[in-house]
Amino acid sequence: MPEELSALTAISPIDGRYHSKTKPLAQFFSEYALIKHRVLVEVEWLKSLSMADELEEIYKISDKAIAEIDAVAANFSETDAEAVKTIERTTNHDVKAVEYWLREALKTKESIAPTTPFIHFACTSEDINNLSYALMLKGARDKVILPSLTAVTSTLGDLAMEYAEIPMLSRTHGQPASPTTLGKELANVVFRLNRQKEALTKLDLQGKINGAVGNFNAHLSAYPNYDWESHSKTLIKNLGLEPIPYTTQIEPHDGIAEIFDCIMRINTILIDLNRDLWAYISVGYFKQKTKEGEVGSSTMPHKVNPIDFENAEGNLGLANSILGHLSRKLPVSRWQRDLTDSTVLRNMGVGLGYGLLAYDSCIKGLSKLDLNLDKLDADLEQCWDVLAEPIQTVMKKYGIENAYEELKQLTRGQGGITKADLHVFIKSLDIPDDAKKLLLNLTPQSYTGIAQKLARNINR
């Protein structure tokens, strides 16, 4: 077995078979990304200390030196990360290794060297970690997950408009029901997804930098008269996060859980969509466009399997399993701190990665759909009994007693009710001629309410 990691040797398909599709998340959730974000937070903390006039013993860095420090964080490379990992093999502590590496990196710069004793000043590791993970998750949400979900909703919205007028037999409890349009059923999903996307966009990620148990104990031992609370809040806000004033040693991770809960709802909506599309393909409402050279079944040459929707459903389930554990576990920590969140947090990218795979598969599946108008129309033509609903509703309007019961006796469980059968019944009704004419003009294809309007309005 070769030792080097490759698509063939990776244990996880996220970094193996599907690496090309999940690669956008690597900039946020790889080990390199975590170390780089830690360096960024350490640098921002050091700069903030230097800029505070009240902290007289801390060397004041010039604007030119600040630019140099920023460059160290911005240009942090994989080679630099390897150097940090080398230090970690001695320290057996990942955050301390970052501190030591940064101190050595800045000592070579004369205008910065006097500040290096204050790297990681008064911090616990979790001050650095919680801000790093928050920035990583925020970046992944804003730059990868939300754009991918927007691609899904945009594709669905376009199809909803395209199919706005295509009538389709509904099925409630698996049985024929009042007709709708195919576009409107897709619009339902777009509406649900957009609502959750909006909620996901608005969720804030919290951060803290307040010491070993959240009380600024060490900070005040050195500078008892300094407003460390304001200092901390300013730094966290400048990072684009929401300061949280009450913590133990760790930030409680409620914000992370809220984001994962929202993503799980989105994924659940998509599971619902993928199962429905799978079923529509199964009953023949959609054919699937074929790809030259592609094989559907290893033994049955005729098959075009709905593999994209199946892959999406499977990966959405995996995503929700992982994100669900993260959401339930992360807000729970024994007393002021235990280490169970540390290893769990490293799997954020795995949960989001399975979701990203699913979004890609869903878009791919949607692009292959080919409408089968003949099958859609044939199903509607076989179900004239769905017009029992409008007929009995109009009968009730004009005071005919037992309207529901009469239509129930005519249609329930009968099967094979034809247009002629219904027209005979309608003509026998004691209702105004204009109402009778309206009912006689109804067809399963035209009895769709405001479905067309709803479908066309979804992108507004």
Image (cartoon, rainbow, N blue to C red):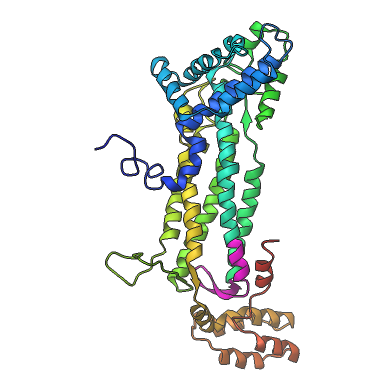
**Taking 289 as reference, is 144 above or below it?**
above
* Residue ID at (49%, 55%): 271
Q: Which of 304 and 281 lies nearest the eye of the viewer?
A: 304
Q: What span is colored magenta in the figure?
A: 156-181
**Taking 143 as reference, is 70 above or below it?**
above
Residue 233 in the image, given as x and y percentages of width and height: 69, 24
**Taking 211 as reference, is 420 above or below it?**
below
Residue 243 in the image, given as x and y percentages of width and height: 67, 27
Image quadrant where residue 160 sits: bottom right
Q: Which of 249 and 335 lies nearest the eye of the viewer?
A: 249
Q: Which of 255 and 77 lies nearest the eye of the viewer?
A: 77
Quadrant assignment for the N terminus: top left
Q: Is residue 240 left or right of residue 312?
A: right
* Residue ID at (62%, 75%): 165
For the view shown, which residue lies furthest in the left direction?
Answer: 1
Image quadrant where residue 398 sits: bottom right
Quadrant assignment for the C terminus: bottom right
Q: How many marks?
A: 0
Mark yes or no: residue 247 visible: no
Magenta stretch encompasses residue 125: no
Residue 404 in the image, given as x and y percentages of width and height: 63, 79
Residue 190 in the image, given as x and y percentages of width and height: 61, 59
Magenta stretch encompasses residue 173: yes
Q: Is residue 19 left or right of residue 70?
A: left
* Residue ID at (60%, 54%): 193
